[in-house]
Image: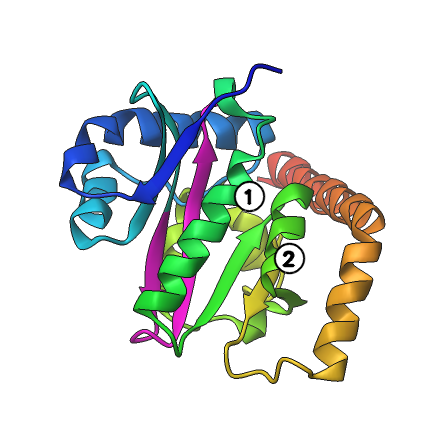
């Protein structure tokens, strides 16, 4: 594989020219996975750049390679690193991990007391989160900020989320708590177990997806018969 040098920096107003490319790739990636992420407009991404709440990856030639941004919820008690995306041509270079590491550092700098959480269906992202200190949690451990959950409305699996009273969906919830003791035995054990069983966990996530989608299709079939 050809060696490519990337520059990963805090995005600012000079990077707004990439906003349409970023949002288009976010949407394409969600469609390819068959899952959804909260749909964002170029204007929203540009706001994050203006606020210094985003990280962008560029090649030495100035070609856009990746992006991720920060969202704060519950009056700053919770923070999410959202919209992680890598341009297809630059995947397989370990760039997603580097971007996650940088946006995590930025989150800790801007919100040192906040809990950082994420929802994902990807095993690769789960592994990266685990390396940063996240642990799997239930949805009830996440923010109850209504604006955050409204963001799920553009996801293709929103009906599943609501049918589960917002307590479960295809995504896995993970949380980093800065207040947790670093030597907390239970947290460390859980994290170690998660890393060791990541492949098994990924299989469980795919089974979960299969079951939930099958149930949804069954409900749709019944509706078409009786309505």
Q: Taking 143 as reference, is 157 left or right?
A: right
**Residue 55 placed where, x, y %?**
34, 45
Question: In terms of secondary structure, where does tag 1 sit?
Answer: helix
Q: Quadrant of the rendered structure where residue 143 is?
A: bottom left
Q: Which residues are magenta?
A: 69-87
Query: Residue 77: within the magenta?
Result: yes
Q: Residue at x 37, y 70 (%)?
A: 145
Query: Residue 108: within the magenta?
Result: no
Q: Taking 22 as reference, is 120 left or right?
A: right
The overriding secondary structure of the stretch rendered in magenta is: strand
Name the quadrant of the N terminus.
Answer: top right
C-beta proximity under 8 Å, tags 2 and 1 = yes
**Residue 68 placed where, x, y %?**
39, 44
Q: Residues within 10 Å of mark 2 (few under 14, many from 20)?
A: some
Q: Residues within 10 Å of mark 1 (few under 14, many from 20)?
A: some
Residue at which label 1 appears: 97
Residue at which label 2 appears: 131
Question: In terms of secondary structure, where does tag 2 sit?
Answer: helix
């Amino acid at each position: 594989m050809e060696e490519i040098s990337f520059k990963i920096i805090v995005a600012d107003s000079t990077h707004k020219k990439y906003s349409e490319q970023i949002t288009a790739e976010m949407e394409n990636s969600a469609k390819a996975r068959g899952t959804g992420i909260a749909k964002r407009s170029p204007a929203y991404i540009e706001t994050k750049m203006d606020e210094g709440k985003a990280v962008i990856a560029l090649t030495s030639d100035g070609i856009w390679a990746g992006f991720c941004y920060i969202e704060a919820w519950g009056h700053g008690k919770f923070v999410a690193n959202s919209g992680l995306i890598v341009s297809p041509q630059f995947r397989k270079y370990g760039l997603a991990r580097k971007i996650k590491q940088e946006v995590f550092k930025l989150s800790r700098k801007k919100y040192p007391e906040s809990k950082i959480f994420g929802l994902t269906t990807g095993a690769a992202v789960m592994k990266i989160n685990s390396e940063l200190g996240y642990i799997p949690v239930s949805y009830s451990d996440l923010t109850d900020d209504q604006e955050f959950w409204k963001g799920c409305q553009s996801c293709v699996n929103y009906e599943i989320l609501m049918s589960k009273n917002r307590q479960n969906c295809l995504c896995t919830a993970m949380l980093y708590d800065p207040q947790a003791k670093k030597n907390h035995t239970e947290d460390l054990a859980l994290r170690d177990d998660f890393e060791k069983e990541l492949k098994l966990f990924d299989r469980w996530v795919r089974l979960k997806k299969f079951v939930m989608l099958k149930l949804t299709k069954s409900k749709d079939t019944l509706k078409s018969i009786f309505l």
